[in-house]
Image (spheres, grey):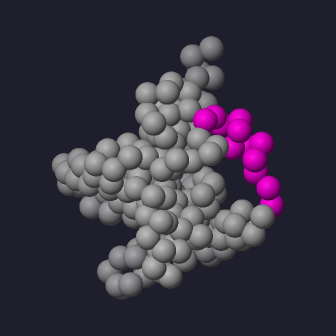
Amino acid sequence: MWPWGHLAVAYLSYVGWTTRRSDRRQTPSGVLAVAFGSQFPDLIDKPLAWSLALLPSGRSLGHSLLTAAVVIAIVYWLGRRVDLADAPIAFAIGYLTHVLVDLHPETIWGLVRGDASQLVWASYLLWPALPAPPYQNDSSFLVHILALRPDPYVVVQFALFGVAVAVWIASGTPGAGAVRRRVRRRLVGESSEH
């Protein structure tokens, strides 16, 4: 899945989590945490596999549920220490949705039909206990970008992103103000130094 698809699925899942009970609401820290969590596995795996060749695949260490459990536990502990209870949960939502929606629809349908040969494509979920899947285009950012085509899978991801943006706007753009303030502080701070 592409970054915008991961972000859309994660944010919509976060919105679902916040609306399930009346005492939860979207917070700026939660929106930023879910956005970061939705990209986190790729921020680990893609550079380490494609640029530095330290990992066997762009879906290995960061995409493993074993790693996810450790990272989420650490983020949860840190969030409790700084009194941000919703941000660690939002990060976990982003992280786990990323890992799970990286299972291609063909793999999911194959598994639903009982095709055990599709399990090889889910092996990244337990890396390094299981080997990384044998992806054909698992070599560079450029190869992936050049392979981008408007096939139904990509179009659905753009559509989901559009829905997520619409929901975010309808929700009052939580998190945007915090980012604007931080950017403004940086710009004003840098311009006053000159």
Quadrant that contains the C terminus: top right
Quadrant that contains the N terminus: bottom right
Query: What is the quadrant of residue 29 in the picture?
Result: bottom left
Q: Position of residue 114 (x, y in %)?
A: 45, 79
**Up/down of 144 relative to 123, above or below:** above
Check residue 141 for magenta coloring: yes
Query: What is the quadrant of residue 145 in the picture?
Result: top right
Q: Position of residue 25 (x, y in %)?
A: 41, 74
| The residue positioned farthest toward the right in the image shown | 150
Name the one closer to the observer, 8 or 144: 144
Q: Position of residue 95 (x, y in %)?
A: 41, 57
Image point (58%, 70%), residue name: 105
Image point (71%, 35%), residue name: 142
Name the one closer to the observer, 26 or 154: 154
**Up/down of 60 relative to 18, above or below:** above
Asked whether residue 172 is in view, the answer is no
Image point (57%, 47%), residue name: 135
76 left or right, relative to 107: left
| The residue positioned farthest toward the top in the image shown | 194
181 left or right, relative to 67: right
Q: Which residues are magenta?
A: 139-150
Q: Position of residue 27 (x, y in %)?
A: 43, 64
Asked whether residue 39 is in view, the answer is yes
Check residue 126 for magenta coloring: no
Labels in figure, total: 0
148 left or right, relative to 84: right
